[in-house]
Amino acid sequence: MKPEFKIISDLINKNSQVLDVGCGDGILMEFLIKEKKVNIRGIEISKAKVQNCIAKGLTIIEGNAEDDLKQFPNKSFDYVILSQTLQAFLNPEKVINELLRIGKQAIVTIPNFGYWKIGLHLLLKGTMPVTKTLPDEWYNTANIHLCTIKDFVNFSKTKNFKLSKSIALKSDQQSFITNSNLNMKNLSSNLGIFLIES
Amino acid sequence: MNVKENIKTITIDKPLKLDCGKTINNFPLAYETYGSLNDDKDNAILVFHALTGDQFVTGVNPVTNKDGWWSYAVGPGKSIDTEKYFVICANVIGGCMGSFGPSHQNPETKKIYGTDFPVITINDMVNAQVNLLDHFGIKKLFSVVGGSMGGMQVLQFVSNYPDKTKTAVPIACTSSHSAQNIAFNELGRQAIAADHKWQDGEYSSKNTIPDKGLAVARMAAHITYLSKKGLQEKFGRKLQERDDLKFGFDADFQIESYLRYQGSVFVDRFDANSYLYITRAMDYFDLVKQNNGNLSNAFKNTKAKFFIISFTSDWLYPTQENKDIVIALNAIGVNVGFVEIKSDKGHDSFLLDVPDFLKALKNFLDKSFLEK
């Protein structure tokens, strides 16, 4: 289980309505059902992963977040989760808008491209970084819209949505991101976790 | 032995007002069951059959001596596990396997109904079949399941009886029959009517059947159940028991021979007038219109959990039409899962050995059954 799942779970109230966008094999969904007794649905594009979710008895809709979120009414979920998927969308801005429309709150986690090891890799080796959270080569990666924690914070200001909670994760150590430590956290963390609302 | 002895039937004595305005009374509904009803009576699954199906879902069909139409999916240990669930399936009204249909005698005129039989709808079909729940003392089904026209009955059933099932599985279907599908059905009906032996539907009193017309209807329909890729892979341009083209109109190609065979065996087991009535029922199916343009309203009173399945190569009831149902359910927060199964076998995929489909169906039912 990814270390961020515990943090996501801590952000969620018991018995709430949750949508996990890009839910994969449903590991987070199962965890949240166990920990928070949530009523949760998942959307997943991979047929094989959809089958795995069905085998676990999870409510899963095969689909693509860029096309298929529009079917949900405004504020139909307490939380909409997007875990390490934002960078794979053709139009991340549109997806964020949809998350904020259908969810009262959204939880977005991003692999931080500002992490110092990634910067160093690029600086010293001169090739696109390949890391544990970003394991693919540039020519076959699904991650076409990578960003840094700082990029995402700036994005929230430009687009006028509220960051209710901003958490940085370094391995399994978590800390809050504030205006004063933003540059530091942008360098030292490999993952950013944001609780956002419109 | 008279095969009709193998057909179980209940007589529905409660008057049923049909959509066409007529009311039918004391009519027979033929059914079959598999597995056994548990003491809590909460393990029953009502399976709805498609256009040319019948109540003999699995095992050997006692009338045709062939395997039941859903033998891949229904049986001990299978997707719809008859060791776990009590499976009920009825022949639709309008059909020809024992339920009230156009080959029955009109008690008033003592003549076979033929085209005097009232036009029936998907709504009428499910309103007839719901009587089986009372017959078996079942308050709430565990599931309603069906593909194609069976899927339409699933949707109509939940709409009419929102609290009578815990789960619902519409497969490869639509909420509103498309112009293309009405067109194909009309082609079939016109093929039957063009056979001079059809005699305006009164062929049985003249001891004949419109076998040529019905066979052509079946051949045309059969093509729509397959996919271009599936046909190409199975038949290609292979010749039928000959080394070269014969420069005539015999079945040179295997695909021709295959279709002719499909047509010829169909006429032995299916009634031409039933084909007219059931295709008409499908054409009239429009759950969107029934709900004044808003499909979500059909399901606004249900707590049933839905699982919708489509197939990539199904061009008769394509994924988008199935997804429209998912969208309508999500719009009102109904619990719905959806999967599109990859298959080259066209619309017929749901009847065939398609492991991903069979696995998904089994997992959905078995996991849902454990939820109390």
Image (cartoon, rainbow, N blue to C red):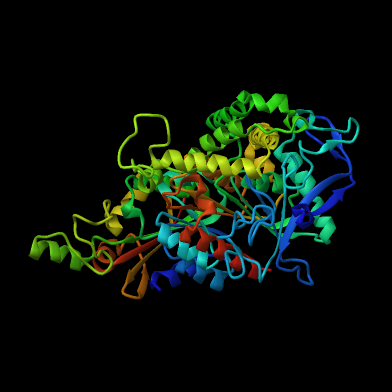
Question: In the picture, which quadrant includes the N terminus of chain A?
Answer: bottom left
Q: For this view, does A146 lie left or right of residue B277?
A: left
Q: Is residue A83 above or below residue B249?
A: below
Q: Position of residue B300 (x, y in %)?
A: 69, 45
Q: Residue at x 90, y 46 (%)?
A: B13
Q: Is residue A186 above or below residue B316?
A: below
The number of numbered discs placed on residues in the rendered structure image is 0
Residue B139 placement: quadrant: bottom right
Q: For this view, does B294 lie left or right of residue B117?
A: left
- Residue B370 appears in view: yes
B78 or B140: nearer the viewer = B78
B211 or A28: nearer the viewer = B211
Q: Position of residue A106 (x, y in %)?
A: 47, 55
Q: Residue at x 31, y 51 (%)?
A: A154
Q: Position of residue B359 (x, y in %)?
A: 51, 63
Q: Is residue B56 above or below residue B150?
A: below
Q: Residue at x 59, y 56 (%)?
A: B70
B365 or A1: nearer the viewer = B365
- Which residue ends up furthest to the bottom in the rendered image? A172
Q: For this view, does B340 lie left or right of residue A15?
A: left
Q: Position of residue B324 (x, y in %)?
A: 54, 41
- Residue A74 appears in view: no
